[in-house]
């Protein structure tokens, strides 16, 4: 019979497989509790990693959870999707002689204990109460918005989130595939902030369904945080890009997660996904799951070593059948007389020995290396940016630069309208969930300071 592991911190409802628990404790014991915290220095949220691991060593799991929550609002999400090999685990000194401490595994373990048992009164994250209690609207429910709402609520303010789409979570919901972040984990984390008292309204497009002015002057909000993400996909700017069945990754992902398809499913057997980052890998893997699809080609202009996706992501995509077509440039999308895609015209590239501004080897086209790949659809994944002039308001005239980027104070992220702040990827550029959360948290602090001075 399997033994259950219990201690005075975890109540009797919880049964943890003893083997799993032993593995976690032995992994925690590998941590050297380094005084300089090299792991924490690499964490965008600045989690006190040795401190939460010490609590695990003492089997104080809720304590460990609360230590993470001092800096990070959603441990269950971060433990699943943070690129730890580039963040905390890359800083771990254990890596120098073997392998780094598996910080994500430890974080995931304490987060799952917390989520299994729900919020216990005495284990709720510590409340920080602001001197003045005010009303704040958060626009956009991605990780930046959710994190800002979480910390504003901890300051004691009344917080409402307004989201344009039907589902909450931004790219956590519409971008990251279920295979990497389960919808249940996301739902649990969202429930957590709702339990704290944050109200969430979906299908509200701020700037068109409701103006910022209305929120402040009619609904009585004292401040607004906008975190609208980077949902404007970049183009390849090649011939044929506006043909049917050429879509960008944002439209593809949104339709995929709505259970629809922007592609004409019946006739599609071969898909080219163009790009070299994690998003391109996710999209290629999802494209493979579409009905009738036989081949998915991942086409990237540099070599596999320059790909921004991690080694693990590449290995998984390959094992699932994604065909990697490296050092390849897509020059033209070729359609037939009725506008249906038949092939793409490509050429081969070679790497030079010079590093470019991204510190990767630059490439150049090999002359007379043109070749064709037969495909029925193309999905472009070559980056994204914030929409130009993202929110229009007839009363508040916010300042944009000539490219339509909102102008904010670098330190506070406040605009020329003192009650209005911006943050997340739309300010940082496409980043990571943890970086967006860290930004949301920082702006929550600035909003709280502002509210305490008005
Ligand atoms: C396919 C894919 C995979 C990724 N994988 C990872 C990963 O593994 N790990 C990782 O750390 N990061 C990953 N990322 C990046 C991460 O998801 C983003 O960095 C993060 O979501 C940005 O957070 P945000 O809150 O700034 O914006 P978003 O998550 O983009 O959220 C913005 C929200 O604002 C809403 N909105 C926009 N305009 C309005 C309006 N006018 N009114 C109301 N609401 C509005 C949008 O609907 C959206 O919900 C991935 C991204 C993609 C696309
Ligand atoms: S660097 Fe590694 S060993 Fe040192 S405290 Fe961080 S997790 Fe522990």
Image: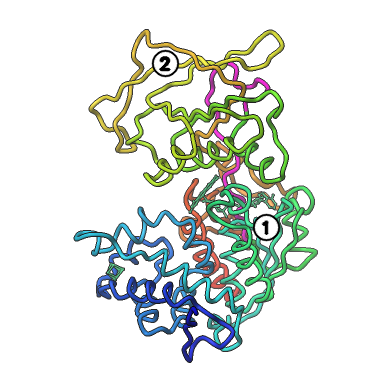
> Residue at the front extreme?
1
Ligand 1 within 8 Å, label 1 CB: yes
Residue extending farthest to the bottom is 8
Q: Quarter of the image for the C terminus: give it.
A: bottom right
Q: Is residue 64 magenta?
A: no
Q: Position of residue 216 (x, y in %)?
A: 73, 63
Rendered image: mark on residue 168: 1
In the rendered image, residue 57, in percent from the top left (x then y), is placed at 35, 80
Depth order, front residue of 174/415: 174
Mark 2–mark 1 Cα distance, whole angstroms, equals 41 Å
Examine the image and state in which quarter residue 343 appears.
Answer: top right
Magenta highlight on residue 226: yes
Comparing marks 2 and 1, which lies closer to the viewer?
2
Q: Position of residue 386 (x, y in %)?
A: 57, 43
Q: Which residues are magenta?
A: 225-246
- Dominant SS of magenta comes to loop
Q: Mark 2 vs mark 1: which is more N-terminal?
A: 1
**Count of numbered badges drawn on the protein:** 2
Residue 279 left/right relative to 314: right
Q: Is residue 106 above or below residue 230?
A: below
Give neighbour class at mark 1: few <14, some 14-19, many 20+ (Cα, 10 Å). many
Residue bearing the label numbered 2:
347
Left or right placement of residue 250 versus residue 382 in this view: right
Instruction: Residue at 62% x, 60% y: name it.
Output: 225
The spot of residue 125 in percent (x, y) is 54, 80
187 horizontally vs 431: left or right: right
Q: Quadrant of residue 270?
A: top right
Residue drawn at (68%, 64%), measured in percent from left and top? Answer: 137
């Amino acid at each position: 019979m399997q033994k259950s592991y219990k201690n005075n911190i975890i109540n009797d409802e919880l049964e943890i497989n003893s083997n799993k628990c032993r593995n976690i404790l032995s992994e925690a014991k590998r941590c050297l509790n380094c005084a300089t915290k090299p792991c924490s220095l690499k964490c965008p949220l600045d989690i006190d990693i040795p401190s939460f691991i010490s609590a695990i060593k003492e089997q104080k799991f809720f304590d460990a959870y609360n230590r993470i929550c001092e800096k990070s609002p959603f441990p269950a999400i971060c433990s699943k999707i943070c690129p730890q090999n580039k963040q905390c685990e890359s800083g771990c000194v254990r890596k120098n002689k073997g392998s780094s401490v598996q910080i994500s595994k430890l974080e995931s373990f304490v987060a799952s204990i917390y989520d299994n048992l729900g919020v216990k009164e005495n284990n709720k994250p510590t409340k920080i109460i602001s001197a003045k209690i005010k009303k704040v609207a958060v626009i956009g429910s991605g990780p930046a918005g959710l994190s800002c709402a979480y910390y504003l609520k901890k300051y004691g303010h009344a917080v409402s989130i307004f989201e344009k789409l039907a589902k909450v979570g931004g790219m956590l919901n519409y971008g990251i595939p279920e295979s990497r972040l389960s919808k249940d984990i996301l739902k649990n984390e969202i429930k957590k902030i709702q339990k704290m008292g944050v109200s969430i309204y979906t299908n509200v497009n701020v700037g068109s369904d409701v103006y910022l002015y209305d929120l402040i002057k009619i609904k009585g909000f004292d401040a607004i945080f906008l975190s609208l993400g980077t949902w404007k996909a970049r183009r390849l700017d090649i011939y044929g890009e506006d043909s049917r069945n050429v879509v960008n990754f944002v439209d593809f992902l949104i339709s995929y997660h709505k259970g629809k398809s922007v592609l004409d499913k019946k006739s599609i057997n071969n898909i080219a996904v163009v790009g070299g980052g994690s998003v391109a890998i996710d999209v290629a893997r999802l494209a493979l799951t579409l009905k009738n699809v036989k081949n998915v080609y991942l086409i990237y202009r540099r070599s596999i070593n320059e790909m921004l996706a991690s080694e693990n992501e590449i290995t998984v995509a390959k094992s699932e059948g994604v065909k990697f077509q490296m050092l390849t440039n897509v020059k033209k999308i070729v359609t037939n007389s009725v506008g249906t895609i038949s092939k793409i015209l490509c050429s081969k590239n070679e790497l030079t020995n010079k590093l470019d501004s991204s510190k990767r080897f630059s490439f150049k086209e090999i002359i007379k290396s043109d070749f064709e790949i037969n495909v029925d659809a193309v999905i472009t994944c070559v980056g994204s940016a914030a929409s130009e002039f993202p929110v229009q308001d007839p009363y508040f005239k916010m300042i944009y630069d000539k490219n339509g980027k909102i102008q904010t104070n670098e330190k506070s992220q406040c605009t020329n309208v003192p009650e209005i702040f911006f943050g997340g990827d739309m300010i940082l550029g496409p980043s990571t969930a943890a970086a967006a959360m860290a930004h949301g948290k920082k702006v929550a602090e600035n909003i709280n300071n502002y509210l305490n001075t008005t």
